[in-house]
Image (cartoon, coloured by chain):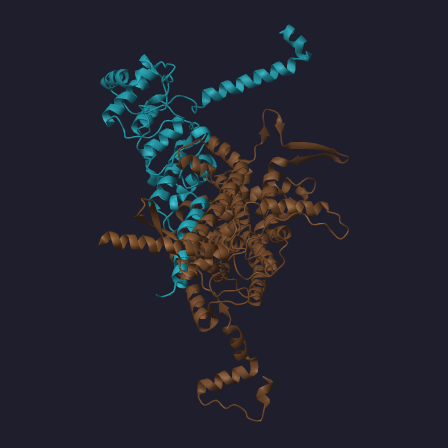
Amino acid sequence: MSSSTATHEYQPKTRVGRVTHFVDSRVGGSGMVKEFGRKIFPDHWTFMFGEVALYTFVILLISGTFLTFFFDPSMAETHYEGSYLPLRGVEMSVAYASSLDISFDVRGGLFMRQVHHWSALLFVAANAVHMLRVFFTGAFRRPRELNWVVGTTLLIMGLAAGFTGYSLPDDLLSGNGLRIIDGVVKSIPVIGTYISFFLFGGEFPGTAIIGRLYVLHILLIPAVILLLIGIHLFMVVIHKHTQYPGPGRTNTNVVGYPVGPVYAAKAGGYFFIVFGIVAAISAAFTINPIWNYGPYDPSPVSAGTQPDWYIGWVDGALRLMPGTVGANWDFEWNIPFPWGVNTLSLNVLFPALVPAGIVFTLMLAWPWIESWVTKDKREHHLLDRPRNAPTRTAVGVAGVVFYCVMWAAASSDLIATHFLVSLNDVTYWLRILVIVGPIIGFMIARRVALALQRKDREIALHGRETGRIVRLPHGEFIEVHEPVDEYKRYQLVSFESPEAYAPVADGNGHVSRSEKLRSRASRFFFEDRVAPVTPSELHASHSGHHGEIANAQDRESIASH
Amino acid sequence: MKALSQRRRHPLAAIALLLMALLMVGAIYSAASSANQAQAQTESFSANDAEEGEKLFAANCASCHGLGASGSSAGPSLVGVGAASVDFQVGSGRMPLQMDGPQAQVKPVQFTEEQTRQLAAYVATLGAGPAIPDEEILDASEGDPANGGELFRVNCAMCHNAAAAGGALTRGKFAPSLEGSSEKHIYEAMVTGPQNMPVFNDANISPEDKRDVIAFLKTIEEQGSPGGADLGSLGPVSEGLFIWVAGLGVVIAFTVWLTSRSS
């Protein structure tokens, strides 16, 4: 803006011009628009899930604000006097009564509650799909490792926001969920009971927990999410967006459309599309019908009690854990300490913490694990097609299978009733699958990825099979292959394919143990790689085949005469 | 008398006294309370009904339940199960059993109302048991759905689900959805405890409370779902499935549309 102090002051001619100039000369908007409006974003439908997550978060803020106008997080006892007949006169907490009032007596309240809850489910789902896209395409590699960590933290915060919100209405379903959390907390050895009493302000359920969760849900967690989203998007702008490989796309450019005007319009419009989808779902489909569940009371537990989908896998792990193995071996140990006997309840502690611990630790550490194995510290702005990184894809599939088996286990009772099988058998099978499934998933995914690479290689070298069979003069039958065009071939041949390496000695000629381990890991990753087609291979196959096809076409024309 | 007073400090005297007191309380309770008494048959069956019922029983039920309903290795004795039990099992289509399994499945009703009544009349003659309930105790409009809802959540929801949508039990057994069940069958199920269901006798839940439970079930059935399609009232599982399949499906369709190039 210092240039505007030059002798020749710009004088806008129209009223709009004067207003914009007034603003621009004070906050410097045009500079930002010039810089940001020219940012290029590549076009691909899989790049849109992060946007969906962002938009659903905005919807959550708007609908959540509406709900805070009417929700009262008090656990004081009251008798419901609202308009829902089957609960009238029933003793309940003020929190539950005000949730019922939002549902039945506040104009538009039920719709807003459903908008809030459906967009919460979609928020976490969009987060998850976005992260799967990032993982399977290798977008977490340098320079984006830290953004991957921020994203994972956002997912965890999303789970926290979801769970605290799920618990607020103080209905039977959410109370049962809190009871499970209480059980998990109490299973932590020695300090568990203290943490539980601290959290609930006394013995479960106490009279404090809803108010505390409310503060976390509407203040702390959204603030953290907002901050992390800011960091996340800032890093996206700094790093620039990744793109899929293709002709003209390199590690140093971004091919796509500028923010202004194309992406601003697309993304802005997309917000309204997502809002519209959520609103249509909320208008037509009920979610969390709290009036069905009744007020929380620690004694009843309803059949079909489950958490929202994103906590389901932890619930599933708890359901899969056997209480005892065989007749005598159980997981509840009483350990004598100088101050008395402490119970170590591994049958709760283990399933509640270990699977989630494994998944999140691996997720957070994966960018570094992979770059350690590949010794690849370069910047990557071009994405991998999942088939071109078979081991990473296989690890991802194993993780997905592990997650999905536990997720399915959370609905074991509904699987039993809806597919007319025994609940016990469902549990036994899922117990086996949660261990064997990821291994099978890993092997199949890796084989499929390698097979697809071989297919790509075949197509790049010999073209597509046309299904036309031609007989040559000497009696041989051949199938005519149609070569792929250069753009498609570029995609098939231009990818990086790291190779397994032997351990390298350090300066003293000593091969360290970690180097040996690293070499073994690299063998595991890249031993059976399918090498990309080289130009010379391509050239060799081309000269041979063109002749063949030309020959075949000659044959045909002769035959048709 | 002297012998008794001499033993009053015997170490076992306290125990003997306690036993006597317990016996007396028990005797008075069972005399005063009618809760565990088999109810008198309120619906009047004619002798002809029972006679016809016996013939139907011999032709359709005796192969498993034995002649005279005395039971066999294939089916339990029906002596004392009462008319309500027959009315429920036959009237809801569970009996005659279609096949062996973890529990009897509902199928199209096999007997006419007249025949069901005759079968019930016959079984009622074998021994006293719960009777088919009167119309007035089944009138849902007389009941208090709020009280029924509380009773339902405490006593029934752990198997039947809070919205009565049904739930799983162990080894292939299940608690069915109560949607569409008649008032009479709901009441009879409570008093007879079919399949794996416990018996809720009149001491557990009084007839008026049972009517409240029925009123609750009929209220939630008739009011429909206030928030739109209920997705089976199965809770968060169907909601999660819906958002992943339908919600995300529509979202993906739009992303593909937005990023497609006009050609």
Extreme-bottom residue of the structure: A7
Residue at x-position 69% and y-position 43%: A191
| Chain that appears brown | A
Q: Is residue A174 above or below residue A433?
A: below
Extreme-front residue of the structure: A474
Residue at x-position 44% and y-position 73%: A261
In the displayed structure image, the side of residue B229 where residue A4 appears, left or right? right
| Chain that appears cyan | B
Q: Is residue A433 above or below residue A329?
A: below
Q: Quadrant of residue A193?
A: top right
Extreme-top residue of the structure: B3
| Image position, residue A476 (x, y; %) | 33, 44
In the displayed structure image, the side of residue A517 where residue A549 appears, left or right? left
**Whether residue B164 can be seen here:** yes
Q: Is residue A449 above or below residue A151?
A: above
**Whether residue A88 can be seen here:** no
In the displayed structure image, the side of residue A250 where residue A369 appears, left or right? right
| A431, A250: nearer the viewer | A250
| Image position, residue B62 (x, y; %) | 31, 16
The total of numbered circles placed on residues is 0
| Image position, residue A57 (x, y; %) | 50, 60
| Quarter that holds the N terminus of chain A | bottom right
| Quarter that holds the C terminus of chain A | bottom left
| B143, A117: nearer the viewer | A117
| Image position, residue B204 (x, y; %) | 45, 30
